[in-house]
Image: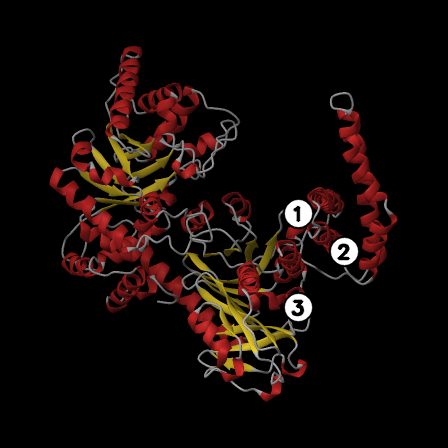
Amino acid sequence: MLTTLRRIVLAFSQEPDLEQGLLRLVSQVKEAMATECCSVYLADYEQEHFLLTASDGLSKTSLGQVAIGFSEGLVGLVGQREEPINIANAQSHPRFKHSPEVQEDDFNAFLGTPIIHQRKVVGIISVQQKQARQFDDTEEAFLVTLAAQLATAISHAEAKGISNPNISQNKWQKLQGIPGSSGLAIGRFYVSYPRSQLSSINLTKHDQPAQQIKRFQQSVLLTIRDFGQMSHRMRGTIPDDTLDIFDMYKHMLESASLGEEITEKINEGWCAESALKLVIDQYIVQFQSVDDPYIRERATDIKDLGNRVLFHLQETDHSKPEVPDDMVLVAQEVTAALLAEYQHKGLKAIVSLSGSTNSHAVILARALGIPAIMGVGNIPLNNLSNKQVIIDGYSGEIFLSPEASLLKEYQHLVKEEEELQDVVREVTDLPTITKDGKSIELLLNAGLSGGIDHSMKNGAVGIGLYRTEIPFMERPCFPSEVEQVSWYKTVLQSFPRQAVVMRTLDVGGDKALPYFPISEDNPFLGWRGIRITLDHPEIFLVQVRAMLKANIGIGNLEIMLPMISSITEVDDAIRLINQAYFEVSSETEEQVLKPKIGIMLEVPSVIFQLSELAKKVDFFSVGSNDLTQYLLAVDRNNSRVAGIYDSYHPAVLRALNHIAEHAQKELIELSLCGELAGDPGGALLLLAMGYDKLSMNSHNIPRIKWVLRHIDYEQAKLILSHCLMLSTTKQVHNYINDQLELLGLGGFVRAGK
């Protein structure tokens, strides 16, 4: 059964058209389970019904026509209960709904199971039989397993429709993702493809088969040459029989059948890349469906072969799509590097099919004030190219080929946003004081770019977090002390009379140094932050010495230690800082100031050691991104659980409030430097909790300053007290948004003013 299941799922995943894939699937399931009918119903939440989309056994004329309400029939019962329903005589069941158009009167046995994606029923798959009997445990297990594996693909049914050539190119569609960076954008999609991966190729047609055949043949010759060179280079270093793999590759490429099949696909109108994908994917399915494990492993070889040919196909195609002036970048996964590559080319927004709202790409997008939507799902990228699109970074909605009325509405909202930004800029250089006189300092998160000019400050009164690891990541080796002194002096001089908090090297987790690789199964719970630098005091001491030297004659340096989880780590770090201080002091006649030392509160264990820690250091700074991640046990870069990661979670808010209460009790300075600080509702709550400083990206400083200058501190405390009593994240979001609307600040959490 496992082999059959694998074959069915693989065949379905390779089908470019959803409806055709489902029709093929129901026939294969019917045959595999030896039943007389298999059907798939897809959920339509706007119409609140399940639509019969594919069937082998029911009337063909009923496909796409018969709808069963969410609370109707056995199909509706499966959806309501969210579990398999196995009935020997379906027609005698009180929930049976007679639909003469589907012609199921002869069927008695019924087994249906829900197709669930991220806790939402996206469809129902059922099998039926004339004989009145209950399906056995093996059959039920097979259907449940199949439904679980199909869930992700079927959940994107609407998006898959983009690849259907029967859909009008002028018909507008709406896609839904996870809002990552707020804002609105109207532009055209520019697709960035990963290189040399057949899985990333989306099927496209081409009207010049001779040209495409020539490209394919040239790529095959280049690939054969590569295999010959590989074999020659390795001859003498490994046994000759091991080199047979290269001969096998060459033989497969020279095989008349493989080349003829790809040529045939090209002559049918497919481009060379698409033809290659179609044929290679077909071979992969065939190999992976075989019981023999040795033969099944050859699927890996054929996939590798296809990717190597694809590499040369892409290398020989030097044509580059023109980048639109109003570019909206879309990719399977938009990275920080990819965003940085295009941000100076008129980039309006980013859309990532995978990835989470707290990836470094999103953090960078927020810093640049660029709307970002993440986790859109498995959409055929190629069909998005150059489509006009509206991006709503507040709701996570994407409107493809929008109709005139919708376009006009969003153009008006974009204009309102621009007007709001003009108003916000008026308070840039004003102090952050509430209407009733409560003040708070807004600081800058820095380190993503080399320098800090006046325009980047945006009214910040210092740097609350300077990420020293960024320069480390841009080099081929560890920087020298002299280089670091130069970097740090430039940063310290940018705020000569205001505090600059420099975080010691914080790598590990999702931040790697190319020359210092760390391979771990669970990097976020592994060797990172202070754990690395304490294990390598030579790295830590050089960095601290450089900071102290750079601070001579300026005197605004503060040092912050990341990823602290115990008192011992603080003691060890302070001992090394003192060592560096005495070393630098002995090497110069100039006065070397001893900086303030603080720690990041981002590991939950420190929440229960605040009193002891307060006696060791000068200040606390909460890293709300990691604290949220660790409190909720959610990898913020994992798109499958990205929806759970939320700093408005009641447990996170209560932890932040607990920290603030203890900091006030211990009379220790408290700041926060996570993404929550740059969120209007989050800033309001943090002010009410009693945080002294909030550190954020440059773009958000005027926005947050405007919000805090237009509220009363006493009113903020009332809002906080209510939030701390709420029990769900959704309740907190809704309440905060309602309160901002009542305060006339709704334009900061939704589109428009």
User: Which label number is shown at residue 34?
Assistant: 3
**CB under 8 Å between callouts 2 and 3?**
no
Picture coordinates of residue 238, whole percent (x, y): 74, 24
Density class for disc 1 (Cα within 10 Å; few <14, some 14-19, many ≥20) is: some
In this view, the mark in front (2 or 3): 3
Q: Secondary structure at mark 2?
A: helix
Residue 353 position within the rendered picture, expressed as x and y whole percent measured from the top left: 53, 55
Question: Which of the image's four quarters has the C terminus?
Answer: bottom left
Q: Is 383 located above or below residue 93 in the figure?
A: above
Q: Residue 346 vs residue 547: left or right? A: right
Q: Indicate the amino acid at tag 1.
A: Gln
Give the residue at mark 1: 197
Q: Earlier in the sequence, mark 1 or mark 2?
A: 1
571 over 401 or under it: above or below: above
Image depth: mark 1 or mark 3 in front: 3
Q: Position of residue 48 (x, y in %)?
A: 46, 78
